[in-house]
């Protein structure tokens, strides 16, 4: 679902919150989703980051004002966003949310509750610590994450490794509008309980009667320099069509 890609783009900012210097990291994952199962590789340097799933690549460039490129290999399309564009789109979406909340508040309680259930709303954000286990040879702490009735995640984080800290930090531009949303603000505050770098994740998103499920778990962690060609957007998207970001389309 496109909503999951939008949520992923917004969530990238949180991935930049790495306070320590470290070697470049290459992590191989086993992944599963609506398209089936397979493997994917993510790359982390101080200048750029590239994350993959079964059908997409997302490349984050920290320098030059920042750029986030999301590539759809199945459709042979890609779109770009800057932190400033993300901030504007998130503000516009939050204004739409506020208007929708005002309209929802005027409905009869029974109808309002039914519509919230269909849309996946209601409830509060929580993060609960679980058991510890090994993932890709590293000690890992499980966390259970819920945000209302529409989002449920499981995540396993390790403090034994960390990607290099980005040379710039534009988290503020992306996260400030999210903090204005009560549900997202609660989730962001709860996520502070999570310590370390995620090596395994699974999520279930329910919205408007539709469900999206994804999962990934690291199978190999490699340290060392990464070739510049790994982040060559022009080469990776050769023959692909550039399209508008779904986040900006939703904000109109």
Image (spheres, helix red, strand yellow):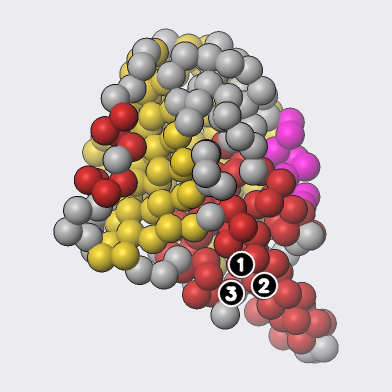
| Residue segment shown in magenta | 185-193
Q: Quadrant of the N terminus?
A: bottom left
Tags 3 and 1 touching, CB below 8 Å: yes
Compute the Cα span from label 3 to label 1: 5 Å
Q: Would you name the residue on which mark 1 appears?
A: 89
**Where is residue 252, by image quadrant?**
bottom right
Q: Which residue is drawn at 45% across and 34% down?
A: 48
First reached walking from the N terminus: tag 2 or tag 3? 2
Task: Determine whether 154 is above or below 222 in the image.
Answer: below
Compared across the picture, whether 32 is left or right of 67 comes to left
Q: Is the magenta stretch mostly helix, strand or loop?
A: helix
Task: Determine whether 104 is above or below 188 in the image.
Answer: below
Mark 2 Cα shell of 10 Å, populated few (<14), some (14-19), many (≥20): some
Compared across the picture, whether 237 is left or right of 217 comes to left
Q: Would you name the residue on which mark 2 appears?
A: 92
Q: Residue 14 appears at what percent x and percent y? A: 62, 40
Q: Would you name the residue on which mark 3 appears?
A: 251
Residue 124's disc is: none
State yes or no: residue 186 in magenta. Answer: yes
Q: Residue at x 66, y 23 (%)?
A: 19
Tags 2 and 3 touching, CB below 8 Å: yes
Q: Residue 223 appears at what percent x and percent y? A: 39, 13
Q: Residue 38 appears at what percent x and percent y? A: 24, 38
Mark 1 Cα shell of 10 Å, populated few (<14), some (14-19), many (≥20): many
Residue 154 appears anywhere in the view: no
First reached walking from the N terminus: tag 3 or tag 1? 1
Compute the Cα span from label 2 to label 3: 5 Å
State yes or no: residue 98 in magenta. Answer: no
**Where is residue 183, by image quadrant?**
bottom right
């Amino acid at each position: 679902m496109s909503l999951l890609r939008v949520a992923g783009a917004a969530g990238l900012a949180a991935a930049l919150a790495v306070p320590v210097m470290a070697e470049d990291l290459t992590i191989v994952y086993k992944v599963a989703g609506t398209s089936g199962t397979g493997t994917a590789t993510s790359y982390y340097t101080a200048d750029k980051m590239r994350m993959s799933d079964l059908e997409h690549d997302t490349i984050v460039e920290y320098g030059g004002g920042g750029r986030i490129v999301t590539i759809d290999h199945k459709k042979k399309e890609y779109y770009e966003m800057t932190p400033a564009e993300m901030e504007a789109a998130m503000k516009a979406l939050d204004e739409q949310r506020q208007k929708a909340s005002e309209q929802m508040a005027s409905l009869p309680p029974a109808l309002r509750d039914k519509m919230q259930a269909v849309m996946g709303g209601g409830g509060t954000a929580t993060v609960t610590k679980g058991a510890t286990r090994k993932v890709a040879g590293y000690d890992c702490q499980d966390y259970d994450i819920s945000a209302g009735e529409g989002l449920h995640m499981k995540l396993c984080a390790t403090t034994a490794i960390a990607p290099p800290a980005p040379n710039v930090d534009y988290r503020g531009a992306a996260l400030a509008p999210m903090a204005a949303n009560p549900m997202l603000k609660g989730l962001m505050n709860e996520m502070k309980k999570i310590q370390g770098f995620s090596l395994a994740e699974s999520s279930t998103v329910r919205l408007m009667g539709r469900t999206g499920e994804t999962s990934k778990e690291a199978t190999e962690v490699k340290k060392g320099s990464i070739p510049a060609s790994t982040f060559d957007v022009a080469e990776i998207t050769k023959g692909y069509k550039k399209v508008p970001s779904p986040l900006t389309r939703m904000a109109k």
